Image (tube, rainbow, N blue to C red):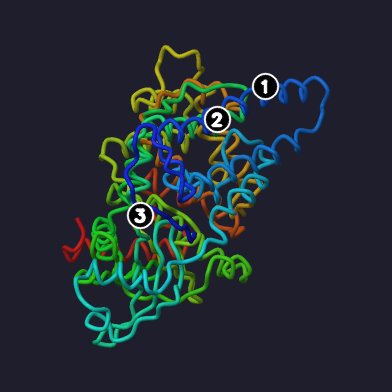
């Protein structure tokens, strides 16, 4: 998880400099540097692309320079821009970046999560007691003022309740909400940020940047409200209570407010520890992540839309604890059915069926200059883990190849990508797909992914041991009336 410090809680004015805290607050001042960098990057990308094509020259220096510019600007901007940059810090950068250069961007953007000082204990106490309306000693038997961990807009402390339960208390940084909300009122800011990402490519896509920016803004806004996060987490905890390998900490509702969230304290291995563990454990953890990310959606039409390694704790029995439910995306059943129809057609190697499902689901138009074969390749080639010889090992190289194939404006599916007219509501789905693929790849997990696809798209019986446990758990829930 990333630790970010937010100073100042003033409201943004249209053109007020107000930079005493290091944050440019005027709407024009916030957008102009992004727009300038976007235009500069797009122009350089065209030149570098042509030079590379004509002479075969190396473009590494261009990407190193651009990544440094991004990290510097986003780190200086804070607010919603820093939050957006953190979202990109783990996934394989931006799809417009060739796979061989993506580590450059990840390294640069990772600095957005480092070296920011925590709140002083005195300030943390003030925020906590103001929110709870009582002294810390009244609410908790013990409270550790040294932060246990940190999230993007708050920090986490270990504590103990008077009944002996160990808990984790997340306290939001003062001013975080004001800074981010002010950014999100600037309708151009996130759209310009997304344009900056696509500015790395000399070939443009017909992508609704404003609609996507609005969708991202909604998700970021939701993360500011810890009451909403507590309600989301309580819903997931109820679904998975007693599950054999997926655990969601219980929420302590009476100690949650809009800026404080108290939940069961969970101990486990961190991401940096997990990726060094033995293969069998990594395989189990990867399957647990995969089933949690996609299985919850298939059954309940909702995603925990922030699959970030800092949000997981890993256990020696192969189970995973899932944390942080500030960003949850809920889909309508018909939206989910549209995606399942595409997956089912791909499973059956049905080219025309895949194209037809995309048209009916609103992902493309029948009049677009895109062939059914191109649409089919767009989906099928980016889901190699389903069709390859099983069991299949997912590696970072595989994930980079899939992401580049599906999302790159210059990749093998560039024509299909260019004409896709998917609703901005699916923007979060792209983030989930990119992040979960990157996570499983970093674990270098081996599994029968094709059998999981058959479960998801065809309703097939589970093949893996964890799949059978998961299936039995939900069958029992349904039989006892605890699951609709």
Front residue of this view, candidates 83 and 425: 83
**Label placed on residue 198:** 2
Distance between the alpha carbons at the discs numbered 3 and 1: 40 Å
- Which comes sooner in the sequence, label 2 or label 3? 3
Element at badge 2?
A: helix
User: Position of 395 compared to 383: left or right?
Assistant: right
Distance between the alpha carbons at the discs numbered 2 and 3: 30 Å
Residue in view at x 30 percent, y 65 percent: 240
Element at badge 3?
A: loop
Distance between the alpha carbons at the discs numbered 2 and 1: 12 Å
User: Position of 59 compared to 467: left or right?
Assistant: right
Residue under label 3: 175
Residue in view at x 39 percent, y 54 percent: 461
Please tell me how crowded label 1 is: few (under 14), some (14-19), or many (20+) other residues with Cα within 10 Å: some
Where is residue 354 shown, x and y percent of the image?
44, 28
Element at badge 1?
A: helix
Residue under label 1: 46
């Amino acid at each position: 998880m990333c630790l970010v410090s937010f100073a100042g809680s003033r409201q943004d004015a249209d053109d007020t400099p107000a930079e005493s805290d290091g944050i440019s607050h005027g709407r024009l001042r916030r957008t102009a540097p992004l727009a300038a960098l976007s235009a500069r990057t797009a122009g350089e990308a065209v030149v570098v692309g042509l030079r590379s094509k004509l002479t075969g020259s190396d473009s590494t220096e261009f990407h190193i320079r651009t990544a440094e510019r991004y990290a510097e600007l986003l780190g200086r901007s804070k607010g919603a821009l820093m939050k957006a940059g953190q979202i990109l810090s783990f996934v394989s950068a931006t799809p417009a970046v060739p796979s061989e250069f993506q580590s450059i961007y990840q390294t640069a953007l990772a600095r957005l999560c480092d070296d920011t000082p925590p709140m002083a204990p005195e300030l943390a106490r003030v925020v906590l007691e103001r929110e709870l309306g009582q002294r810390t000693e009244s609410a908790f038997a013990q409270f550790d003022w040294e932060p246990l961990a940190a999230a993007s807009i708050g920090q986490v402390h270990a504590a103990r309740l008077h009944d002996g339960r160990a808990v984790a208390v997340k306290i939001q940084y003062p001013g975080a909400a004001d800074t981010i909300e002010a950014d999100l009122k600037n309708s151009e800011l996130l759209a310009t940020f997304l344009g900056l990402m696509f500015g790395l490519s000399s070939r443009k896509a017909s992508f609704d940047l404003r609609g996507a920016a609005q969708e991202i803004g909604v998700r970021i806004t939701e993360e500011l409200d810890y009451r909403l996060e507590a309600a989301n987490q309580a819903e997931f905890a109820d679904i998975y209570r007693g599950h054999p390998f997926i655990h969601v900490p219980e929420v302590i509702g009476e100690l949650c407010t809009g800026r404080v969230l108290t939940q069961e304290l969970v101990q486990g291995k961190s991401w940096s520890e997990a990726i060094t563990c033995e293969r069998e454990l990594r395989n189990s953890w990867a399957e647990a992540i995969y089933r949690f990310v996609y299985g919850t959606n298939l059954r309940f039409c909702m995603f925990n839309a922030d699959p970030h390694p800092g949000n997981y704790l890993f256990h020696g029995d192969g189970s995973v604890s899932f944390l942080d439910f500030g960003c949850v995306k809920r889909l309508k059943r018909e939206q989910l059915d549209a995606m399942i129809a595409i997956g089912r057609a791909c499973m059956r190697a049905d080219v025309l069926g895949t194209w037809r499902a995309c048209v009916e689901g609103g992902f493309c138009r029948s009049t677009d200059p895109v062939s059914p074969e191109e649409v089919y390749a767009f989906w099928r080639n980016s889901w190699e883990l389903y069709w390859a010889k099983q069991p299949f090992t997912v590696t970072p190289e595989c994930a980079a190849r899939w992401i580049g194939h599906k999302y790159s404006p210059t990749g093998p599916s560039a024509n299909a990508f260019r004409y896709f007219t998917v609703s901005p509501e699916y923007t979060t789905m792209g983030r989930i797909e990119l992040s979960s693929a990157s996570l499983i790849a970093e674990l270098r997990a081996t599994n029968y992914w094709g059998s999981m696809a058959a479960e998801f798209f065809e309703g097939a019986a589970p093949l893996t041991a964890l799949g059978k446990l998961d299936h039995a758990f939900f069958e029992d829930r349904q039989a006892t009336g605890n699951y609709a």
